[in-house]
Image: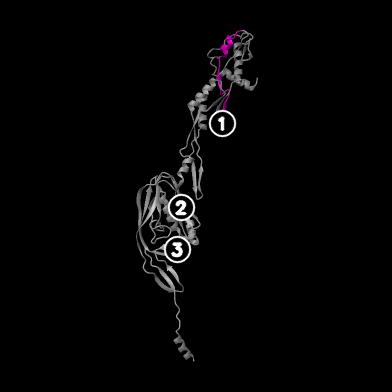
Amino acid sequence: MTKQRKIILSLLFTGSFFLSCFALCGFTAGKVKSNVVVNGLEVGGMSVREAVLKVRENLAENLIPLTVITPNERVTVTYPELSFSDDAEKVIRSAKKGAVVTVRPVRQWADAESRIQRLCDSNARLAVDAEVDFSASGFTYQKEKEGLVCDYGETLARVFDALAKDEREVEMATYLYPPALTEEMLKERTRLLSSFTTRFDASNESRVHNIRLAADKIAGAVVLPRAEFSFNKRVGKRTAENGFKESVVIFDGEFVKGVGGGVCQLSTTLFNAALRAGLRVTESRNHSLTVSYVPPSLDAMVSEYSDLKFVNPFDTPVYLNAAVRGGSVTVECFGLPDGYRYTTESVVLYRLAPPPEETVEGEDDKVIRAEKEGVASESYLLVHDGGGKLIRRVLLRRDNYAVVRGLRQVKKQEETETPETQDNNSDQEE
């Protein structure tokens, strides 16, 4: 007798799954009538006990397995984990001489509840939100993944139904549920809100260097909902140690040399882009003199003591990009549109003409200081609805820009001798 056969016989003797065996009916004396065939087995003339064990051994060996199909795997349950009940003793005892009869097992899975629960747990998965990465190169998206939940009660019902119907396979009952954030939603939340460009002299290498360096520091910034953005904090101090070069800056109403010259053009460009994106500016200041790249009251001077700040008032992040291309710098804001369109307006209240140009003598003719008119101005934020109708006009700032008296250097005229003087000199030399 093989080891497997011994195990089967042992289980057949001791298993609680036989509803008709020892404890319930007992094996009483008696023999099977002659020439009786059960499930293809000759059992005629055997004792009832022997015949029942033989038939049950055959049923166990040929018991139909059950495969549970899950999203991740196929789990097959076989004897002895999959057991059975039968009416073998009743069929054998009632079989007449020469009868050919069939005993059909009813499969049972005693551990079905706990095993299905474990399968449900191992196959369930949480939904994964889509993700977005932002840098100076733009956006990259990681697609979302649906979550999966196992319907334990339905799966168990399917298992018991399959067991009763002698089916070989049963599919786990599951349903998918969406994540909270999809790639489509992220793309909607990262649309272009605004873009603003200013231009400069591309031949001024140190100024271009400073603008590009500051733009590189702005590029890739993310302003979270309700968070405040600080230009100075993001860009850092404009020092030689931080890579900035010397160029022209406005200091105390004069154009002078200073480290970081040109950075104010980037802050101004960002200021205008932020306004057009619907961001709420909390700090900005005008230059002491008007600048050429934006209208009055739409500039934003930054220094060690003056900052450009704005708050993201939306429920979703705002993304900032900045880039220098040729003789221009562009700032872009990305986010979820709020349904409004924002523009700006500069209003000059009055202008002051500069006083007459001052001249000084020097080695050559040149302009030392260009004259500039004084300006008093206001700027406004204009809010339009989806149809383009102006619904609000909000005062942003009132500013005064100083008058600058021009200063020109003229070449000093050389003194020349008159003819009379020359004659006298000749006489003297003679």
Q: Is residue 148 above or below residue 312?
A: above
- Hey, which residue is sitting farthest right in the picture? 1
Q: Earlier in the sequence, mark 3 or mark 2?
A: 3
Front label number (1 vs 3): 3
Sort mark 2 into few (<14), some (14-19) or many (20+) by Cα contacts within 10 Å. many
Could you say where residue 340 lies in the image, as x and y percent from the top left? 40, 46
Q: Residue at x 54, y 21 (%)?
A: 163
Q: Nearer the viewer, mark 3 or mark 2?
A: 2
Residue at the spot of label 3: 248
Q: Amino acid at mark 3?
A: Val
Residue contact at pointers 1 and 2, CB within 8 angstroms: no
- Marking on residue 73: 1
Spatial CA span between label 3 and label 2: 22 Å
- What range of the chain is rendered magenta? 72-96
Q: Quadrant of residue 74?
A: top right
Say which amino acid is labelled 1. Glu
Residue 91 forms part of the magenta stretch? yes
- Please name whichever residue, 424 or 220, is drawn nearer the observer in this view of the structure: 424
Direction from residue 41 to residue 208 in the image, left or right: left
What number is the disc on residue 331?
A: 2
Q: CA distance from mark 1 to mark 2?
A: 52 Å
Image coordinates of residue 414 in percent, x first then y, are: 45, 79
Of marks 1 and 2, which one's residue comes earlier in the chain?
1
Asked if the residues shown at circle 3 and circle 2 are in contact, with their CB atoms under 8 angstroms apart, the answer is: no
Q: Is residue 109 visible?
A: no
Closer to the chain start, of discs 1 and 3, is: 1
